[in-house]
Image (spheres, helix red, strand yellow):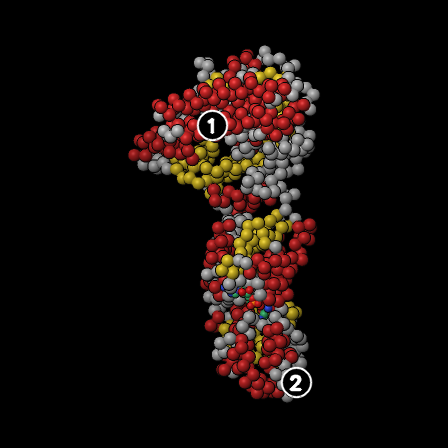
């Protein structure tokens, strides 16, 4: 014999009940069928009772709607000539139900005993209707009333099973016949109705299964089995194929609603396997729970469960340390107050015991504890006891977690990397469950982080927020659009664009924006008042593995890094403003990134994609000391002076060309004035370990005053045009001595300076072609022959590639 239980959604309509019949008719052995109420019925019955208690007659409408639904389903399933018995039964039961609600209405009183009676009708209706239908379909089932077989005592809404009496009542049932019985309901020794708790139909089925010692228990619902995480939180949650009883218990206890936790014990004791199946996809295997696990689990962690609505109560104080019986007093007090303890932690100093309870119990628990410890509180041995709410518990579950070294480290590391604070930790000696308490606002993020961390078949999502869709920004989008599929296939990485902003608009979309359509999405985005709107949106989304990328030249955007890093969101930038702002701010950004377990990468601020900053950092890390840096750091200025020939073209033509080719800053005055190079040498000096400020960098401007004061690019071009003779003079002075003009930045002995110099063919800078940069570093290890980095140092595509490299560096360090 099999015991088979169908949940509320499986019997929600006549069509669904027909599917149930198909499943049953394929069974090759007798079955004992347990059904839930048609979905939503128990809630409506409870509502009707509460409406009646509230003194409004709206309960009558609720009951009417329920009656009509039950009549309708019965009429759709049962042939006209067979309907009478069923309809009469339903009508009689509804008469009783209505009378009960009228009593509640008249008395203004609703006891648990009455509520249990009212809520018991759903399963009685459903089992009776389905039983008659199955008989009509020749499945030959006998309807029995669970009230006559399952005995429970105590709380009317969540009774405690009387095992002995239940066993003696069930044992005489005939295992060669088919039965149907209502789930959820039992009766006590006085014959009153007692419920088995919400979800109790699973438990009813397990009680029948255990006592009849059947071959198996099947639990059919509208999901494919037990998932490895809550699918409402984790879209990539997958069905677990097999679980031990204990694993299933841990998972169902901690929130996996597909199986009511008490269900496991009655069948586990007899070694009866449980199969979780989907009524709407019966071909799927579902989840097997039992002793005979066929597959060696690949992952030590089988599932991640979570429950919200937890309050933490801390009993703390010097009076707790070393005094025997304090813990006993805490738990005895909570037991007397009927408070269920979800989680306990105590540190070895014994100065505090932290208890997790569900929110609804917190006031009761706090009052009881404060009363019990009144004398200790008065003597200041124990602090006044308070509860803090809005917490969630997340648990990793798996039998094979035992003795797995490093697992907790992985758990804490993954959460820490995403800025998720762990408030309390609990791990049993069985090591089957490690639970952490976190703020509920982080529950979804944490569950996803852990799911990606412990189930390596799931692709890892990286959430990207990008500011700037200009020259560099567009190239960056293009690179990702081209690389996305390869990254997914080869690196299991899903780079998801969840936010874009430019100076005018922004879009935020957790589901992801197409990398090919960034511009289109942005054009339809909302207008941005201030960049802080975008930052607020990022914070609110609170997504795991978040990275912000600044492809702008904006001061406003760069001013937001600190706030972003404090959210544990890494920052990548090619914008030089933040790194060349005050030393204190620059240092603060680096320190904040470390403190909040994230990264601040800005390799492209010097030499575009050339590995200049990384090289200096590595030299220092390995103990080298930088003594001197001499460099050509402006791609655009090198391009301009390499291409300007006063007899063939004008200076303004070349500057315009440099801008068009994407080498200059959005405002080319930043290049021509020397500011861009000053910023760069300042950044390099700081990376070399010197706390220099921008106003300490000495620069000799080579453009005339009228150019220096131009307000925008157009005005600048006009001013340059008017000053052609100045530039011609510069050119001729250099070429008359076979020299070339180079803007050279130098850092030496704690000082930095920038200037236009005439270099001769003997100089290593003489042959620097096109838009190239060169950085020559002298250090303790490279005292005479410098370490030289040379190559193209400007261009949107190269810079975007450098930004992408910074992104992959972060992903490789933190996510993979
Ligand atoms: N072109 C190159 O070779 C290199 C450029 N860079 C840096 O790349 C950055 C970007 O340069 P380009 O792409 O040429 O500039 P661009 O002017 O073409 O694009 C700038 C983008 O930033 C957006 N933006 C401006 N203010 C904003 C704000 N307040 N909020 C949001 N978005 C804002 C603009 O709407 C635009 O989409 C600059 O900081 C530059 O120094 C760094 C290394 C090399
Ligand atoms: N405008 C810059 C671009 C790179 O930082 C330059 O000319 O080098």
From what the image shows, is residue 510 above or below residue 6? below
Residue 288, can we see it? Answer: yes
* Residue lying farthest to the left in this orientation: 378
Residue drawn at point x = 60 percent, y = 16 percent: 142
Cα–Cα span, label 1 and label 2: 94 Å
* Residue lying farthest to the front in this orientation: 81
Please tell me in which quadrant of the rendered image residue 29 appears: top right
Please tell me in which quadrant of the rendered image residue 9 appears: top right
* Label 2 residue SS: loop
Residue drawn at point x = 67 percent, y = 75 percent: 769
Residue drawn at point x = 49 percent, y = 82 percent: 705
Using the image as rendered, state which of residue 682 and residue 634 is in the foreground: 634
* Label 1 residue SS: helix
Q: Where does residue 443 sit, x and y in percent of width and height? A: 51, 42
From what the image shows, is residue 12 above or below residue 635? above
View quadrant of ligand 2:
bottom right
The residue carrying mark 1 is 64
Q: Where does residue 161 sit, x and y in percent of width and height? A: 50, 19
Q: Where does residue 559 sit, x and y in percent of width and height? A: 47, 62
Using the image as rendered, state which of residue 163 and residue 321 is in the foreground: 163
**Marks 1 and 2: which is nearer the front?**
1
Residue 276, can we see it? Answer: no
From what the image shows, is residue 484 above or below residue 380? below
From what the image shows, is residue 459 above or below residue 617? above
Residue drawn at point x = 54 percent, y = 17 percent: 145
Badge number at residue 648? 2
Crowdedness near tag 1: few (<14), some (14–19) or many (≥20) residues, C-alpha within 10 Å: some
């Amino acid at each position: 014999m099999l015991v088979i239980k169908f949940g509320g959604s499986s019997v929600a309509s006549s069509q669904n009940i027909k599917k149930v019949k198909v499943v049953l008719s394929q069974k090759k052995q007798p079955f004992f069928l347990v059904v839930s109420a048609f979905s939503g019925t128990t809630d409506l019955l409870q509502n009707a009772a509460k409406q009646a208690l509230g003194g409004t007659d709206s309960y009558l409408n609720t009951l009417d709607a329920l009656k009509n639904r039950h009549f309708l389903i019965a009429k759709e399933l049962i042939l006209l000539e067979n309907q009478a018995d069923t309809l009469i039964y339903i009508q009689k039961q509804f008469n009783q139900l209505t009378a009960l609600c009228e009593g509640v209405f008249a008395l203004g009183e609703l006891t648990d005993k009455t509520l249990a009676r009212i809520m018991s009708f759903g399963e009685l209706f459903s089992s009776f209707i389905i039983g008659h239908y199955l008989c009509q379909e020749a499945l030959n089932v006998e309807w029995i009333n669970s009230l006559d077989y399952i005995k429970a005592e105590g709380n009317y809404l969540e009774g405690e099973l009387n095992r002995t009496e239940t066993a003696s009542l069930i044992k005489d049932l005939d295992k060669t016949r088919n039965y149907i019985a209502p789930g959820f309901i039992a009766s006590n020794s006085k014959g009153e109705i007692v419920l088995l708790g919400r979800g109790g139909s699973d438990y009813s089925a397990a009680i029948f299964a255990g006592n009849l010692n059947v071959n198996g228990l099947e639990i059919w619902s509208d999901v494919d089995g037990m998932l490895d995480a809550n699918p409402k939180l984790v879209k990539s949650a997958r069905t677990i194929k097999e679980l031990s009883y204990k694993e299933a218990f841990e998972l169902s206890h901690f929130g996996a609603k597909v199986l009511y936790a008490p269900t496991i014990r009655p069948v586990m004791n007899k070694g009866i396997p449980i199969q979780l199946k989907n009524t709407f996809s019966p071909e799927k295997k579902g989840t097997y729970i039992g002793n005979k696990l066929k597959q060696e689990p690949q992952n030590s962690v089988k599932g991640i469960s979570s429950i919200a609505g937890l309050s933490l109560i801390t009993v703390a104080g010097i009076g707790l340390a070393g005094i025997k019986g304090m813990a006993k007093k805490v738990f005895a007090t909570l037991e007397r107050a009927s408070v269920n303890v979800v989680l306990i932690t105590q540190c070895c100093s014994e100065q505090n015991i932290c208890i997790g309870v569900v929110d609804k119990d917190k006031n009761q628990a706090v009052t009881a504890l404060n009363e019990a410890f009144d004398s200790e509180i008065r003597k200041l041995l124990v602090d006044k006891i308070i509860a803090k709410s809005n917490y969630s518990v997340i648990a990793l579950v798996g039998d094979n977690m035992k003795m797995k070294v490093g697992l907790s480290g992985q758990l804490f590391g993954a959460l820490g990397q995403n800025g998720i604070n762990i408030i309390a930790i609990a791990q049993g000696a069985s090591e089957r469950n490690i639970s952490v308490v976190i703020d509920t606002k982080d529950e979804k993020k944490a569950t996803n982080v852990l799911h990606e961390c412990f189930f390596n078949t799931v692709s890892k999502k990286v959430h990207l927020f990008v500011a700037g869709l200009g020259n560099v920004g567009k190239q960056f989008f293009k690179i990702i659009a081209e690389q996305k599929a390869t990254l997914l296939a080869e690196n299991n990485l899903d780079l998801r664009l969840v936010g874009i902003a430019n100076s005018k608009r922004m879009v935020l979309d957790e589901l992801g924006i197409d990398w090919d359509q960034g511009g289109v999405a942005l054009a339809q985005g909302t207008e941005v008042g201030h960049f802080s709107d975008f930052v607020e949106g990022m914070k609110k989304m609170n997504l795991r593995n978040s990275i912000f990328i600044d492809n702008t030249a904006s001061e406003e955007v760069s001013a937001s890094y600190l706030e972003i890093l404090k959210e544990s969101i890494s920052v990548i930038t090619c914008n030089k403003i933040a790194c060349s702002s005050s030393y204190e701010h620059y240092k603060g950004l680096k320190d904040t990134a470390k403190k909040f377990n994230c990264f601040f990468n800005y390799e492209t601020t010097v030499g575009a994609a050339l590995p200049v900053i990384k090289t200096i950092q590595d030299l220092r890390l390995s103990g080298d000391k930088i003594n001197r840096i001499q460099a050509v750091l402006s791609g655009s200025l090198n391009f301009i002076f390499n291409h300007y020939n006063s007899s063939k073209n004008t200076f303004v033509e070349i500057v315009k060309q440099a801008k068009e080719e994407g080498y200059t800053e959005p405002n080319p005055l930043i290049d021509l004035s020397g500011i861009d190079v000053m910023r760069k040498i300042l950044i390099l000096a700081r990376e070399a370990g010197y706390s220099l400020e921008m106003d300490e960098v000495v620069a000799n401007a080579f453009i005339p005053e009228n150019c220096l004061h131009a307000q925008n690019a157009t005005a600048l071009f006009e001013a340059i045009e008017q000053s052609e003779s100045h530039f011609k003079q510069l050119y001729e002075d250099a070429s008359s001595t076979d020299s070339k003009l180079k803007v050279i930045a130098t850092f030496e002995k704690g000082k930095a300076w920038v200037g236009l110099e005439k270099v001769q063919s003997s100089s290593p800078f003489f042959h620097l072609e096109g838009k190239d940069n060169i950085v020559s570093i002298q250090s303790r290890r490279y005292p005479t022959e410098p370490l030289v980095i040379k190559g193209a140092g400007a261009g949107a595509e190269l810079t975007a590639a450098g930004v992408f490299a910074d992104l992959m560096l972060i992903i490789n360090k933190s996510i993979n």
